[in-house]
Image (tube, helix red, strand yellow):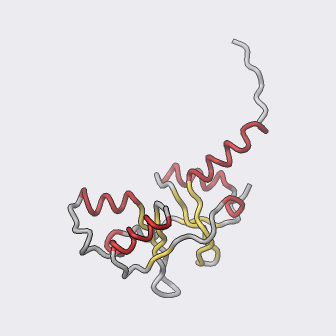
Amino acid sequence: MLVKNIMKEGVSTISPLARLTDALRIMRDKGVKSLIVNKQHEHDVYGIITYTSIIKAVFAEEGDVELLNVYDISVKPAVSISGEAEIKYAAKMMANLGVKRLLVTQDNKLKGIITISDIMNTLFDHIDDIKVEEVSV
């Protein structure tokens, strides 16, 4: 199965120049755990802000939520994968890099996002199709 078959399209994005409070409102209102930070020009790369990056900036580093902008806390470049890649490679990237989501891109354009939950849900959906040989002890 390919990444493009299980990715989520229509992801929530935000300007890097937006205030963190705006990002928090969008995340709350849309019920999402991350926002994709838009590129500022054609040759720029996407970034991402997540619950983890927000908690780190606000609490661990004692940042003032009202003074921070999205670019202050975003992870850039965000890790991405082609929609044409097999899901197993997305899973390996997540495990090896310690991330829970990957941007799905094509020709440096955002197409969607795939999360560890998407991969696990696919595994759960297909678990009954997997034949297990009986093992005698």
Task: Give percent across and percent down for residue 19.
Answer: 33, 77
Q: Tell me the quadrant of the picture where the N terminus can be found.
A: bottom right
Task: Give percent across and percent down for residue 134.
Answer: 76, 21
Residue found 45% across the figure and 74% down from its top: 37
For the residue pair 27 and 74, the one nearer the viewer reads as 27
Q: Tell me the quadrant of the picture where the C terminus can be found.
A: top right
Residue found at the far front of this picture: 29
Task: Give percent across and percent down for residue 122.
Answer: 68, 48
Residue found 48% across the figure and 79% down from its top: 38
Residue found at the far top of this picture: 137
Q: Name the side, left or right, on which 99 lies relative to 90.
A: left
Residue found 59% across the figure and 60% down from its top: 114
Residue 15, placed above or below residue 119: below
Q: Name the side, left or right, on which 129 lies relative to 14.
A: right
Q: Name the side, left or right, on which 9 lies relative to 77.
A: right
Task: Give percent across and percent down for residue 90.
Answer: 60, 56
| Number of on-image labels | 0
For the residue pair 119 and 29, the one nearer the viewer reads as 29
Residue found 38% across the figure and 68% down from its top: 24
